[in-house]
Amino acid sequence: MALNKVEICGVNTSKLPVLNAEEKDELFRRIKEGDEQARELYIKGNLRLVLSVIRRFQNSSENADDLFQIGCIGLIKAIDNFDTTLQVKFSTYAVPMIIGEIRRYLRDNNSIRVSRSLRDIAYKAIYTRENYMKQHLKEPTVAEIAQEIGIEKEMIVYAMDAIQNPVSLFEPVYTEGGDTLYVMDQISDKKNKEDRWIENLSLREAMQRLNNREKHIIELRFYEGKTQMEVAQEIGISQAQVSRLEKNALKSMRNYLRP
């Protein structure tokens, strides 16, 4: 999803207005009196908030314009329901509303089919969570949500997990020093450690061509099934260094094995 566009949904993001505290208070006073023009000004003055939120979903395959529109719906709902007597910043209240609206959209457009009953449980839990945060200004526990809607907490966790968007193993987590770390680098393999391709004796021969540190990293990663973070902690270097050494080692082994 491209978020570096200047114009999204016909809005020039580089020229969005910024409201100061006094302007926000005055506009909200007018909004409460039914002033539609004040409402429009307040929406425009907070569109940067929507932009900042949709950046959290930049790895999504959804179109930036679509997410921006959905985020604006969340912003409008936040404006219409915000209680100024709570003594909290509008952004503190609005961000969860915008995120919730976008997540609902992504769930409803998920290509993976989830049973209706699980969806209903998940939506009830989400609705209860949002109401709880609105009333108590803090995140509820799963037990508190379960008690409120009368459903076992294990079922709530299962339902929430079922509606999550799948993540590619090749999705980048972060980049450090030019080395990109992917989701697959964070996952350990506890099951098929001895019956994989690395068991091949020719690979043993290729490993002998590595230096001691590279060989140790390959053994920890592919024989013991440890994550790069676990390897980094064990040998006392950064995860980025582990990633770099692992890539170099695998490249050397491929070059040796290539006919």
Image (cartoon, helix red, strand yellow):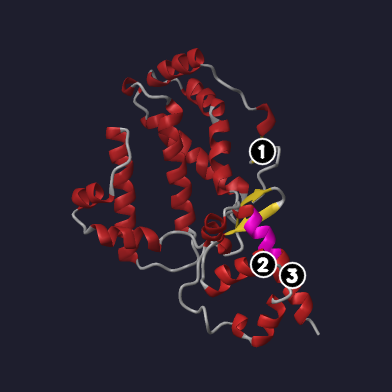
**For the residue labelled by badge 2, is the local secondary structure a helix, a strand or a loop?**
helix
| CA neighbours of label 3 inside 10 A, class few (<14), some (14 to 19), many (20+) | few
Give the camera-side residue of 63 and 244: 244
Q: Residue at x 56, y 56 (%)?
A: 232
Q: Quadrant of residue 254?
A: bottom right
Task: Return the x and y of residue 8 as percentages of the image width and height.
Answer: 65, 40
Q: Earlier in the sequence, mark 1 or mark 2?
A: 1
Q: Earlier in the sequence, mark 3 or mark 1?
A: 1
Against 119, is 195 above or below?
A: below
Q: Is residue 257 magenta?
A: no
Task: Return the x and y of residue 47 as percentages of the image width and height.
Answer: 56, 32
In the image, farthest residue toward the right: 259
Magenta-colored segment: predominant secondary structure: helix
Q: Residue at x 32, y 58 (%)?
A: 157
In the image, farthest residue toward the front: 212
Label 3 close to label 1 by CB (< 8 Å)? no
Q: Is residue 246 magenta?
A: yes
254 displayed left or right of 169:
right
**For the residue labelled by badge 3, is the local secondary structure a helix, a strand or a loop?**
helix
Task: Return the x and y of residue 75 as percentages of the image width and height.
Answer: 47, 35
| CA neighbours of label 2 inside 10 A, class few (<14), some (14 to 19), many (20+) | few
Residue on which disc 1 sits: 10
**For the residue labelled by badge 1, is the local secondary structure a helix, a strand or a loop?**
loop
Against 126, is 201 above or below?
A: below
Magenta span of residues: 241-247
Q: Is residue 173 visible?
A: no
Residue on which disc 2 sits: 212
Against 81, is 19 above or below?
A: above
Amino acid tagged 1: Gly
Q: Residue at x 51, y 41 (%)?
A: 71
Residue on which disc 3 sits: 251
Single out the mark in the foreground, 3 or 1.
Answer: 3
